Amino acid sequence: MIKKKGCMPCKKFEPFVKETAEKNSLEFRTIMGESMPEKLQPPYYPFFYLYKDKSVLESWGGVSEKKLLSVLKRILKK
């Protein structure tokens, strides 16, 4: 059995995030915190960065489906 890296909340929330990204034609990438530049390492996990043209539009943490959908709705309207 291959063990998938990442914390349990990240593993449980990932399928929802991937599905939501697909539905909205967004690219989704998983990056382990240890692999991130020190200045971008989040305070807790899972943590999300929404980028456009190499700029961070929004960042937030947690496993709230409501929060994820709210951010995407607001950002995608622009």
Image (spheres, rainbow, N blue to C red):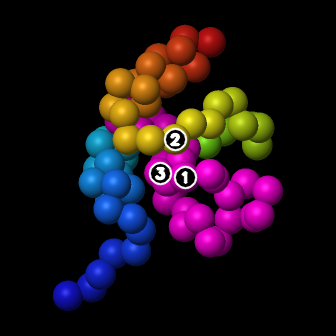
Question: Which tag is nearer the camera, tag 3 or tag 1?
Answer: 1
Q: Residue 44 carries which label?
A: 1
Snapshot quadrant of residue 8: bottom left
Snapshot quadrant of residue 33: bottom right
Residue positioned 53% across, 47% down in the render = 47
Q: Residue 61 carries which label?
A: 2
Snapshot quadrant of residue 55: top right
Residue positioned 38% across, 56% down in the render = 10
The answer to the question of whether label 3 and label 2 lie on touching residues, with beta carbons closer than 8 A, is: yes
Q: What's drawn in magenta, residue-wise?
A: 20-48
Residue 36 x/y as whole percent: 68, 65
Q: Which of 43 and 25 is in front in this view?
A: 43
Q: How crowded is mark 2: few (under 14 residues within 10 Å), some or many (20 or more)?
A: some
Residue 57 x/y as whole percent: 69, 30
Residue 61 x/y as whole percent: 52, 41
Residue at the spot of label 3: 46
**Disc 3 to disc 1, how far (Cα)?**
6 Å
Location of the C terminus by quadrant is: top right
2 left or right of 70?
left
Residue type, numbered disc 2: Gly
Residue type, numbered disc 3: Pro
Q: From this view, report whether residue 68 is shown above or below residue 51.
A: above
Q: Which of marks 3 and 2 is nearer the N terminus?
A: 3
The answer to the question of whether label 1 and label 2 lie on touching residues, with beta carbons closer than 8 A, is: yes
